[in-house]
Image (cartoon, rainbow, N blue to C red):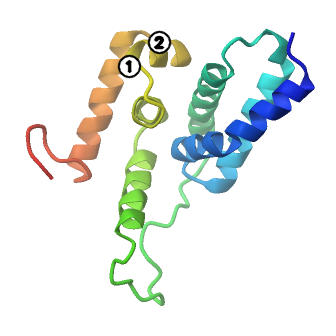
Amino acid sequence: MRDDEDFGRFVMESYAGLVRRAFLLVGDAGHAEDLVQTALTAAYLRWWRIRDPSAYLRTVMSRTAIGWRARRWNAELPTDPLPELPQPEDPYGDVVVGDSVRRALMALPGEQRAVVVLRYFDNCTEAEIAKALGCSIGTVKSRASRALAAMRAGGLLAEEGQIR
C-alpha cells in the first residue's frame, strides 16, 4: 500500500515535467499549474490503488484540459508583439520556434492538441493515447492526422516528403 511519503516523493520527482506537459495542453503557465494541481489532487485521493501514476496523470490532465477548453473563454491571448518593444536580432531562435509551436498547439481543438502532446511530447503509442483519452486507435490516428495537416497549413511543418 502506498503512503503519503511515497506520493510526496513522486510529486517532487515529476512536478516539473507535469507542468511542462500541462503548459503544452493549456498554453498558459497559470492554467498549467492549476491543471497539475487538479490532476495531483485526483491522484492523491486514489493513490493507494494507482499502479502507474504517470499514465494516470497523463489521462487526468488530458481529459481535464479538453474539458476546460470546451468551457473556458480564453480568447484574450496576445497574438502580436507589443509595438513599443524592439524586436530582437534572433539570438534566441529556439524561443521563437517554441512560441510558434505553442501558438500552433493553441489553435488546435483540445482533442487534437492532447493527441499531439501525448504522441510527440510524452512519446506515447497510439494505444496508450487511445486508453488515456478513452477513444479508439482510429480516432487517435484521425485526430493526429488532422492536427498535423492544420500545423502544415499554418506553415509550422513542412509538407510530407519536403525538408524544411
State the CA–CA distance, disc 1 to disc 2: 7 Å
Quarter residue 88 falls in = bottom left
Q: Which residue is pictured at 42% across the width and 72% down the height?
A: 80
Task: Determine whether, in the image, residue 2 is placed left or right of residue 68.
Answer: right
Q: Which residue is pictured at 74% across the width and 13% down the height?
A: 50
Q: Which residue is pictured at 68% across the width and 37% down the height?
A: 14
Of marks 1 and 2, which one's residue comes earlier in the chain? 2
Task: Determine whether, in the image, residue 19 is placed left or right of residue 120.
Answer: right
Taking depth in this image into account, of 49 and 110 the one nearest to the observer is 49
Residue 37 visible in the picture: no
Q: Which residue is pictured at 80% across the width and 33% down the height?
A: 9
Residue under label 2: 135
The N terminus lies in quadrant: top right
- Above or below for 127 versus 22: above
- Above or below for 105 versus 131: below
Taking depth in this image into account, of 30 and 43 the one nearest to the observer is 43
Q: Residues within 10 Å of mark 1 (few under 14, many from 20)?
A: many
Q: Amino acid at mark 2?
A: Cys
Task: Determine whether, in the image, residue 156 is placed left or right of residue 66.
Answer: left
**Residue 140 numbered tag:** 1
CB under 8 Å between discs 1 and 2: yes
Taking depth in this image into account, of 97 and 102 the one nearest to the observer is 97
Q: Amino acid at mark 1?
A: Val
* Residue 87 pos. (x, y %): 38, 84
